Image (tube, rainbow, N blue to C red):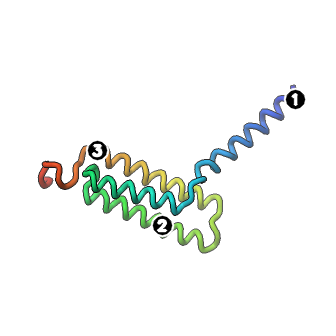
Amino acid sequence: MKKILISIAAVSALSAAAIPAIASAQPINDRQAQLDRRIDIGVRNGSLTRGEAYRLRAELRETERLEHRYRRGGLSGWERADLDRRFDRISAQIRYERHDRDYGYGYGHGPRR
């Protein structure tokens, strides 16, 4: 019984350690490019207004500056996790803004009042 409990604990520890590794498997530069591409697509198809795109790009630039500061001393696991959380938040903001029914230029809604 003791051997079974020890093996279960070992498997759980290994799987818990693998989850953050899977989340950070995508290189940071690829993730930044993907988020920027999603913003561009949103502007082009009208699902993001210019103001929304401006705010999202400002948040992305701020995160890129933070990444450069982190890389000066070498990127630690905590810093990588922090960047991943920030990119996740930006991704969620893009998703929200693209589906909030605020349409950009060219969709017949005229200027906002």
Kind of element beneath mark 3: loop
Viewport quadrant of the N terminus: top right
User: How many other residues sit within 10 Å of disc 3, few (<14), some (14-19) or many (≥20)?
Assistant: few
Camera-nearest label, 1 or 3:
3
Q: Tell me the number on the disc at residue 74.
A: none
Identity, as a three-letter code, of the amino acid under mark 2: Glu
- In the rendered structure, which disc, 1 or 3, sits on the residue that comes first in sequence? 1
Which residue in the protein does label 3 denote?
100
Left or right of residue 103, residue 111 in this image: left
Which residue is found at the position 53% from the left and 71% from the top?
68
- In the rendered structure, which disc, 3 or 2, sits on the residue that comes first in sequence? 2
Kind of element beneath mark 2: helix
Camera-nearest label, 2 or 1:
2
x%, y% of residue 76? 65, 63
Kind of element beneath mark 1: helix
Identity, as a three-letter code, of the amino acid under mark 1: Lys
The relative height of residue 78 versus residue 5 in the rendered view (above or below) is: below
Which residue in the protein does label 2 denote?
64
Which residue is found at the position 13% from the left and 49% from the top?
108
Which residue is found at the position 33% from the left and 54% from the top?
41
Which residue in the protein does label 1 denote?
2
User: How many other residues sit within 10 Å of disc 1, few (<14), some (14-19) or many (≥20)?
Assistant: few
x%, y% of residue 98? 32, 48
